[in-house]
Amino acid sequence: MKIKTNKQRLVLLDAHAIIHRAYHALPDFATSTGEPTGALFGVVTMLIKIIEELEPNYIVACFDLPDKTHRHEAYEDYKGTRKKVDENLILQLNRAKDIFTAWGIPIFSMPGFEADDILGTIVELEKKNKNLEIIIASGDMDTLQLVRDKEVQVYTLKKGIKDTILYDEKGVVERFGFKPLLLPDYKGLRGDPSDNIIGVKGIGEKTATQLIVKYGTIEKIYKALKKGKGEWEEAGI
């Protein structure tokens, strides 16, 4: 289904997340010389689908780099539980840049920062451009915090590389119960095992949602704590 708009449309590719998803979703294809191509096949399939459905005016690919980022400086154990990346995946991450170059798609990356930071920076720089709609294509749900009305949406993979969903602000609220801007507070409370972020002891998904819906930001939760335990007990927390 084509997704129409009267504005110009910029699609930001969270390249690392898309390639990683394709690598685990598809068989181990290879060339006649043995070069792995399964993830690359997935990237091309996804690109064709994005171009056909979203009809973008512009596309940009944002990449992670292998070095540590500013998050590691803040928290030494950031992503500390992740396994070493497969060599075949590393080869295809590098090779994917040839695909984007061949398609005329600019590649953005920056030492010390992740693709997420670049996506967020571009969204911030373009937020006053009323003639531009931004869609972030990613397999990483962290990007949902950037969603703003229908001006910034996230086109993400539900299953495999063909089953997709487009999240606007209403879609994020329907899924989580609160607005996209509160997702960092939610992650701060419940943690994020995939990034080895511990969160607050004793608070899981349900309680984190309850707190965010009732109070909003973590700062507002602390203000409520100072008032005493009465309303917390009434809320069943």
Image (cartoon, rainbow, N blue to C red):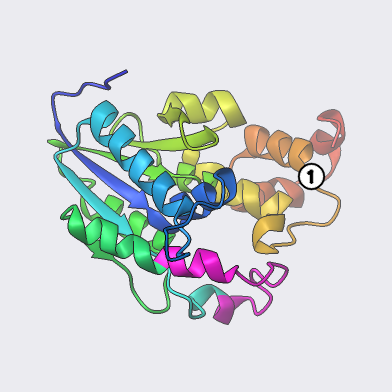
**Placement of 51 over or under 11, stated as above or below:** above
Quadrant in which the C terminus is drawn: top right
Three-letter amino acid code of the residue under disc 1: Gly
Residue ID at (53%, 66%): 88
The answer to which image quadrant residue 183 occupies is: top right
Q: Is residue 179 visible?
A: no
Q: Is residue 139 visible?
A: yes
Instruction: Give coordinates of residue 6: x percent, y percent.
Output: 13, 24
Is 121 left, or right, of 86 in this rendering?
left
Q: Mark 1 packing: few (<14 Cα in 10 Å), some, or many (20+)?
A: some
Q: Is residue 137 magenta?
A: no
Lateral position of residue 125 relative to residue 173, left or right: left
Front residue of 184/193: it is 193
Segment colored magenta: 72-93
Residue 18 position within the rendered picture, expressed as x and y whole percent measured from the top left: 45, 49
Observer-nearest of 232 and 189: 189
Task: List the single residue furthest toward the front.
Answer: 32
Nearer the observer, 59 or 129: 59
Badge 1 marks a residue whose secondary structure is loop
Q: Residue at x 19, y 24 (%)?
A: 5
Residue 37 in the image: x percent, y percent? Answer: 44, 56
Q: Which residue is mark 1?
A: 204
Tell me where residue 102 appears, x and y as whole percent.
19, 57
User: Which residue is painted at 69% across and 62% down in the image?
Assistant: 197
Residue positioned 16% across, 45% down in the render: 58
